[in-house]
Amino acid sequence: MSPYFSHPLRGLAAGIALLFASSLAQAESTHGIAMYGDPALPPDFVSLPYANPEAPKGGKVVFGNTGGFNSLNPFVQKGTPPWQLRFWTHESLMGRSWDEPFTLYGLLAESVETAPDRSWVEFALRDEARFSDGTPVTVDDVIWSFQTLGTEGHLRYRGLWSKIDSIEQTGPRSVRISFKEADRELALIVGLRPILQKAQWEGKNFADAQLHDVPVGSGPYVVKDYEAGRYVNLRRNPDYWGADVPFRRGTMNFDDIRIEFYGDATVLFEAFKAGELSAVREFNADKWDTQYSFPAVQRGDVIKTEIPHGKPSGMTGLVMNTRKAPFDDWRVREALMLAFNFEFINDTITGGAQSRISSYFSGSDLAMQPGPATGRVAELLAPYSADLIPGTLEGYAPPEGDGSARNRANLRQAAKLLAEAGWTIQDGVLRNAAGESFQITVLLQQGDGEMQTAIEIYTRALERLGIKVTTERVDNAQYTGRVSELDFDMTPFRRALSLSPGNEQRLYWGSEAADAPGTRNLMGVASPAVDGMIDAMLASESREDFVAATRALDRVLTAGRYVIPIWSFDVGRIAHVSALKYPETLPIYGDGPQYMPEVWWYAD
């Protein structure tokens, strides 16, 4: 200590030290972190509750994708990679339990520590964490991954970077991330970011990665070989570092996974019937009941398994591009929803076996409640009342038809709304005051047979309103490019939602990214009310406030008429070879890439 360090300053320093020590005392390292409350599993948990820690390792499974691929890097905007890769080849600092609304447990990180207000989070890396080439995962890799993904990575990763104030090494194996804003969820989101190997990309352009530039990962699987557009073979890494980490016990049990690519879903299904694939997911209840009686099922070689879940419905349907007229008028959107004869279409395609999605969070306690907004929901929406679309405060539900093929009553209502919006029939064609005809182009991906059937029925109804419909069917690469450039009028849409919605809601429907190429806000929502409800969700310190904010958001989105909703998926349906087994305990989130094949195993 300097001899010039005076006694008064010593007292001040001691006081600061005490305050600092007090602050540290409130923040303790732990094995997991939950959005609200404490993690359900204790520090000494053996495995996730829906995994079998004694599951045998071995066997080969083959899955099918439609379309093709021209990239094996799922972390950049460029190209179309197999969607499964980011789940199987790379680990994050922590892993998510799908049996809790939003809780993480240690993976690359052995422990996590946060400030009481979650203004920062600190992770301690496991000494044994390794990339697939045997090199250790370092703090430098973590920092580089956050910086690179945040500035050059896929758009899904970039929003977080703007909220990080600093990221710094605090010890040989520890890293602290501080945030610019109050947001309890950020501490969890950073825990789920994939960690890449910095050394692999030195002297290379990460964002312009070529097909052969396969990212080195730290996950259980590595890419063994591939043929562009046809197949990818993955091999379980025999030296995988995390086999005994509690979060990973009983998971990733297959030795080999192969992904085959097919031109469309019909060809893929025929390949499964012929024994070329190990499992398929079926999303059509009628097809599940009527087309899964082929010989392999009758012999018992193929088993039909249903996996229930407790998650929200999410939104599935036809999204309208509100950046362009006439879709920027809610009356036009309501008219188009009235013309979509859901009851008849549902009966034709699913046999009426699947109920309609009624809101974005339907099927959960986060869903908007019937009737007018009340209580805390009404309070949250009140500041935006002057600009809310009719039905938001009063109550709204998607229109119902009478089940007939003609759907006359709804078409009459649709015609009336269109007239109010300035569109009238002139010589059999719907035109506006300028004489411009009402035309819609529906962009479809090749192989989407169900949606094509729905559009064919829908087109006949729209033609009776004087609307001309053109359907464009394009391949995967073209479809991805068109959607990324927001070059569509209407297109199929699916957005899965969780029991703990958070920052991803800004990506899905926040104003900031509404017009950005590659945005996930396909409908182009730019609503202060939507932004405000997302802010309220993220600022919630109690479960009660969080639920109210989510229900309010659900009202604004549903009454916005941005998507024509179709049927819900209230149960997962998996047809699989009999050798594939799964634990008896099911997660509350049901099926998904985190469930099948992650916790399944092969038993001869």
Image (tube, helix red, strand yellow):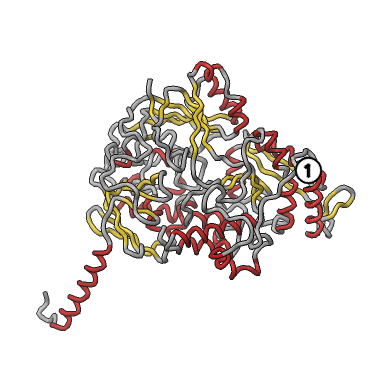
> Can residue 205 be seen in this snapshot?
no
Mark 1 = which residue? Answer: 407
Q: Which of 202 and 274 is in front in this view?
A: 274
- Does 16 sit left or right of 532 as displayed? left
Vertical position of residue 515 compared to residue 364: above or below: below
Question: Could you say whether the residue bearing mark 1 is in a helix, strand or loop?
Answer: loop
Judge from the rendering whether residue 283 lies leftward or rightward of residue 204; answer left or right.
right
Image quadrant occupied by the N terminus: bottom left
Q: Please tell me in which quadrant of the rendered image residue 48 appears.
A: top left
Specify the amino acid type for callout 1.
Asn
Residue 267 in view of the camera: yes
- Residue 593, above or below 410: above
Q: Which of 585 and 155 is in front in this view?
A: 585
Asked which quadrant contains residue 224, the reply is: top left
Number of numbered discs = 1
Residue 185 location, x and y as percent?
41, 58
Q: Where is residue 236 in the image (x, y as percent from the top left)?
A: 35, 32
User: Measured along the vertical axis of the image, is residue 393 above or below residue 494?
Assistant: below
Q: Which residue is drawn at 53% across and 46% down?
A: 496
